[in-house]
Image (tube, rainbow, N blue to C red):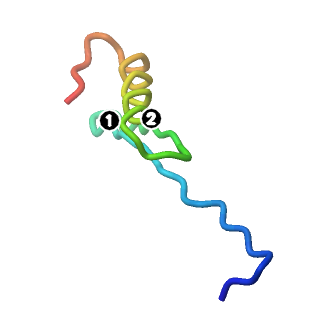
Amino acid sequence: MRTHDDKRLGTTSLFAALDVATGNGYGQLRRHHRSVEFLEFLKVIDAEVPGEQDID
């Protein structure tokens, strides 16, 4: 039941990736779930994964 002073802060989106070979996990919490935020997350993953390792 909602009242006049009930404050809903919305949902949070989790972008996550797992390196199954090493068990390393990468994640970010975002207020929005749009392509802009997802592309930023992919850029972070690309920067953190060593250059010789493939990202599939």
Q: Is residue 32 above or below residue 54?
A: below
Callout 2 crowding tier (Cα within 10 Å): few <14, some 14–19, many ≥20: some
Residue named by callout 1: 19
Nearest-to-viewer mark from 2 and 1: 2
Q: Nearer the viewer, residue 2 or 26?
A: 2
Q: Is residue 29 above or below residue 11?
A: above
Q: Quadrant of residue 47?
A: top left
Left or right placement of residue 31 versus residue 44 in this view: right
Q: Residue furthest bottom?
A: 1
* Quadrant of the rendering where the N terminus is positioned: bottom right
Callout 1 crowding tier (Cα within 10 Å): few <14, some 14–19, many ≥20: few
Label placed on residue 37: 2
* Quadrant of the rendering where the C terminus is positioned: top left
Q: Quadrant of residue 23?
A: top left
Amino acid carrying mark 1 in the image = Asp
Left or right placement of residue 6 versus residue 53 in this view: right
